[in-house]
Image (cartoon, grey):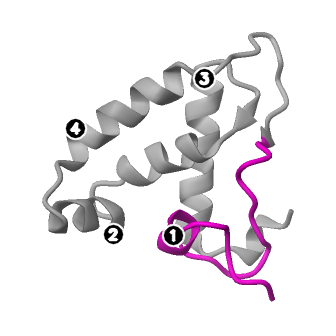
Amino acid sequence: MRLDKFTVKAQESLEGAQKAAQERGQQSIEPEHLLLSLLSQDEAIIPSLVRKIGADPERLRQDVDRAVSALPNGRGIHQRWIGGTLCLSTAECSPDILLAGGGCPKG
């Protein structure tokens, strides 16, 4: 996968997802890691959208953090990969498209 084909914000979101997995010793990056990364970006669109639907983005972030922490870990494994349920295209993407479901438009 060529990350340079993604937008800067999408790259940052994926890096945040990777960091979340790495900090917990988890070997795969799952949708929960990406959602946690998106919710952790204070100035990004996702927390704003969550507020607009009447939810508390910080509380949602905490709930997702607990879900991520409950995922299996593989301590001692240094290679990470995208989990089978998180399918990403190398087309240009934005974090909101990634979160909307099913990855990015094919291109």
- Please provide the residue range marked out in magenta: 82-107
Q: Which residue is drawn at 58% across and 23% down?
A: 23
Circle 2: residue type: Ile
Q: Which mark is residue 45?
A: 2
Asked if 51 appears above or below 29 in the picture, the reply is below
Estimate the x, y position of residue 95 in percent, counting from the top left. 51, 68
SS at mark 4?
helix
Q: Which mark is residue 71?
A: 3
3D distance between C-alphas at marks 4 and 3? 19 Å
Judged from this view, the residue extending furthest toward the bottom is 107
User: Looking at the image, is mark 1 or mark 3 earlier in the sequence?
Assistant: 3
Circle 4: residue type: Arg
Could you tell me if the residues under marks 2 and 4 are in contact, i.e. CB atoms within 8 Å? no
User: Looking at the image, is mark 2 or mark 4 earlier in the sequence?
Assistant: 2
Q: Residue 100 carries which label?
A: 1
Could you tell me if the residues under marks 4 and 3 are in contact, i.e. CB atoms within 8 Å? no
SS at mark 2?
helix
Residue designated by label 4: 59
Circle 3: residue type: Leu
